[in-house]
Image (tube, rainbow, N blue to C red):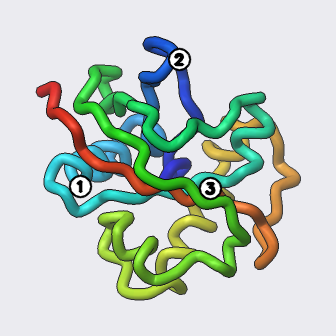
Amino acid sequence: MRGPALPVTWSMSRHCHAMSFAYPGTLRDALIEAVLDGSKTTTTSLLEEYRRAHESIRPVGTLSVPIDSGGRPVCVLRQMAIRICRIDEVGAAHARHEGEGFRDVASWRRAHEGFWSSDEFLDGIGTRDLRITDSTEVVCERFALVQRLR
């Protein structure tokens, strides 16, 4: 999950950005381990996250460095594909490659909607008025592990 992972938190260079999955704690740590063991190769964010942070979506080929719960860089990821779509258009393959054991799109959606409805997430993006519907736009990203840093 991007917030599942949150939008880029700070820029390391023009084409390499630090990024984080979820918030510090158990979920972030599990997502980092899934990236490192190869079971997580996709992530999903709300397009609204980018809008509220005034961030642009990174182009294919961009390098990102996920940080762990302690703020330490973990690895380098290369952006392989990006797709903006409605949440009801997310497919089973994308959900499965999130590395969280989702058996189907319905379980993926329930988990993501739960995260995006959490007080922590809503406070983080600065609104309590967010409503997830079938037409909510999401950013589906596919990435590849380039290098481990720890």
Q: Secondary structure at mark 3?
A: strand
Residue tagged by mark 2? 10
**In the image, what residue occupies the spot 60% across and 53% down?**
45
- Locate residue 57, reporting x and y percent: 64, 39
Q: Secondary structure at mark 2?
A: strand
Mark 1 and mark 2 lie on one chain; the one further toward the N terminus is: 2
Asked if residue 24 lies left or right of residue 144, the reply is right
> If you read the primary sequence from the N terminus, does the residue marked by circle 1 or circle 3 appear first?
1
For badge 2, the amino acid type reads: Trp
Q: Which residue is mark 3?
A: 139
The mark found on residue 22 in the picture is: none
- Look at 79% across and 39% down and name the residue there: 51
In the image: residue 99, left or right of residue 19? left
Q: Estimate how packed mark 3 is, as few (under 14), some (14 to 19) or many (20 or more) residues with alpha carbons within 10 Å.
A: many
- Label 1 is placed on what type of residue? Ala
Above-or-below relation of 59 to 114: above
Between the C-alphas of marks 1 and 2, the distance is: 23 Å
Residue linked to disc 1: 34
Categorize mark 1 by other alpha carbons within 10 Å: few (<14), some (14-19), many (20+).
some
Whole-percent x and y of residue 11?
A: 51, 16
Q: Nearer the viewer, mark 1 or mark 3?
A: 3
The answer to the question of whether label 3 and label 2 lie on touching residues, with beta carbons closer than 8 A, is no
**Which type of secondary structure does the marked residue at label 1 adopt?**
helix
- Residue 61 location, quadrant: top left
Which of the pair 107/48 is nearer the observer? 48
Q: Would you identify the image quadrant in which residue 100 lies?
A: bottom left
Q: CA distance from mark 1 to mark 3?
A: 20 Å
| Image location (x, y in percent) of residue 38 | 19, 57
